[in-house]
Amino acid sequence: MKNKQGTENGWRKLDNTANVFPVIASKTYSSVYRISVRLMQEISEEILQEALNETLPWFSSFNVKLKRGVFWHYFESNKKQPVVEKEQTYPCAYIDPNTNNQFLFKVTYFDKRINLEVFHAITDGTGALKFLKALTYNYIKLTYREQLSEEILEMPVVDVVSDIEDSYRKNYRKLSYKKVKARSAFKLKGEKLPILTMNVIHGLVSAKVMVDFCRRYKVSLTQYIAALIIWCIYKEYMNEQPHKKPIKVNIPVNLRHFFNSTTEMNFFSYINVGITIEKNEYTFEEMLEITRGQFMSQLTKENLSHLISDNVSTERNILIRVAPLPVKNMGVKIAYMGSEKNNSSVISNIGKVEVLEEFKEYIDRFEVLLSVSKSEPIKCGVCSYGDKLVISFASILKETYLQRAFFRHLTEQGIEVIIESNGVGYEKM
Amino acid sequence: MKKCKRCNVKVYENTTICPLCRTVLTDIGGEVPGRTYPAIEVNQHKYNIVKRLFVFLSIISGLATVVTNYVTYSGVVWSAISVAAIIYFWIIMTYSIKRNTNIASKILVQVLCASILTVIMDYFIGYSGWSVNHVIPEIIILANISVLILVIINRMYWQTYILNQIIIAVFGLIPGILYLCGLIEVPLPTIIATGTSFTVLLGTIIFGDKSIKSELIRRFHF
């Protein structure tokens, strides 16, 4: 094919938040997250590779390499093929833009699990999940070709094709509002695991039981988990004493619902739930109530518009636009170092994963893992599929105080928890 | 399946220790699963002996030449040349061996570093102008030809080399300017170097057309 498109590489700008990630990513904080799907049978490398080759052309958001311009990074379409590998590192390892055939994502597999590891510059959890679902459909189609009906084999694997709008710019309105300076948060400290080692602990609970349980307290699942993590930090790391720094958890919010977008690029923002421990005695119920209140006040379209406005207006500032890339990078690094102080931990709930009815019987469950850093050493990823709710902790701390207190709290409430880990907790003693 | 009586959780894993609290688990029957995560044995932090050896030797030999030069000083700061050469060696080692970087940009880095190195050498052994008269023009001619060969071999990806090609060609015009300022005593190499650079530049602009424009737009978008 030697047409115009063949000779000329397409390119596009990074979306508004994506600009940060190429600057801050490093071996020790990769900005890579993992979404995995566990199927019913062991994964075959050849079929997975074939499924990936079929999936990638549908996603121009993934089919890119990162390039440096004079003023900004940009994406150029990547003509190479990504290679499927057997999992051989800890989850969420740094993806060097110059290796991996210059792709910014990785597909690995182990046992019955397919892992999609994505560098945050290309997309957020929603975009990645869309890709993983398409990949899984293709994989299932190829594996069970004989058993599946013609109708299912012909079924499209995506609904919206390659929507790569920058929804931040699309929904940008110039707003002026009073900015509140964020207070630096209480940090989890402790002895670290050997460098680049990650302790992964998944807790599997029944989604139905958990949702019914949260309903009793009139809170959402994310609110409950956020409050429980704050509670565990208070119990295990603060020793139930007052402290001048608040415990703050950062919760990424998918903006697509709020602004009616279907983009495959990043479109998320954060809310921050923080509790300052001022008195000696707190009950869990009190913390739950505070958390719920903060969710209600922050999770509004108005507040989220402010955050978008803030980000986009910074990017559009003419002085920032004309600064050469190395100068911008320095600015971003400094700003990032400041913002890092603001969170004790991060909770990302990608919610209930829905798949096409026809493929349900082949899929066991989905899992999410986030990359951690020195300043945010434990992060929590949540997702559910069918009745299987998986709460996954990624950590670089040797001790598992937070995870232990978290799951013990659930079992004390009578909720059955099944634990699975990657073995670091007892192997790297 | 196993159970931890302290945490009161079930553990679905091939282990006898609780991942949460390291209590010894009680077996409650049912199947024992295989590994769900790989055992990672490779030490990720590789101890690179060759690199360490080179760092060590570079520092030692750099310091040794400076000290020797200082002790036996006879009017020539020759140690500056060896230190510059060591620095040049490191730039080449770290940049040029990197995989997946644009070959044309490797050539560009070579042109700049080698030119600076020759000027330093020339300057410290009593400036006689051989660097600007002969070596730099020759480096430029060579670089122009190399990039041209790259473009011919890899026509499909020409636009990825364009920016580097333009920078090398513009750099190649500098000896011409020096000549006009009267700083060049041996004109022939300079005339050839500037001539090839100008030809390459003109050729790129005329034949490049849209691909140059699109490459420049993406590189300079703001």
Image: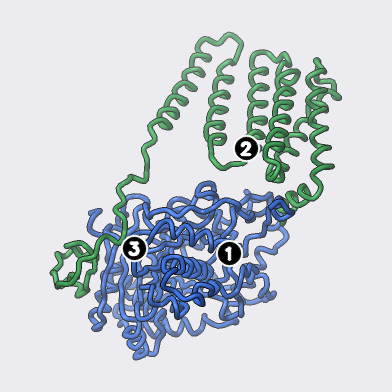
Distance from the alpha carbon under mark 1 to that under mark 2: 29 Å
The disc labelled 1 sits on which kind of residue?
A: Phe
User: Which chain did the image draw in blue?
Assistant: A
Mark 3 touches mark 1? (CB < 8 Å): no
Distance from the alpha carbon under mark 3 to that under mark 2: 42 Å
Residue A8, compared with residue A39, is above or below; it is: above
Q: Which residue is mark 1?
A: A59
Q: Which residue is mark 3?
A: A42
Q: Residue at x 73, y 16 (%)?
A: B129
Q: Which residue is mark 2?
A: B103
Q: Secondary structure beneath disc 1?
A: loop
Tell me which corner region of the image, top left, top right, bottom left or bottom right, holds residue A217: bottom left
Mark 3 touches mark 2? (CB < 8 Å): no
Q: Which mark is residue A202?
A: none
- Does residue A261 appear left or right of residue A276 in this picture? right
Between A114 and B195, the residue placed more toward the observer is: A114
Q: Residue at x 53, y 71 (%)?
A: A157
Between A340 and A223, the residue placed more toward the observer is: A223
Estimate the x, y position of residue B158 in percent, counting from the top left. 71, 43
The disc labelled 2 sits on which kind of residue?
A: Ile
Circle nearer the viewer, 1 or 2: 1
**Dot 3: chain letter:** A
Q: Secondary structure beneath disc 3?
A: loop
Estimate the x, y position of residue B147 in percent, counting from the top left. 70, 34
Q: Secondary structure beneath disc 2?
A: helix
User: Which chain did the image draw in green?
Assistant: B
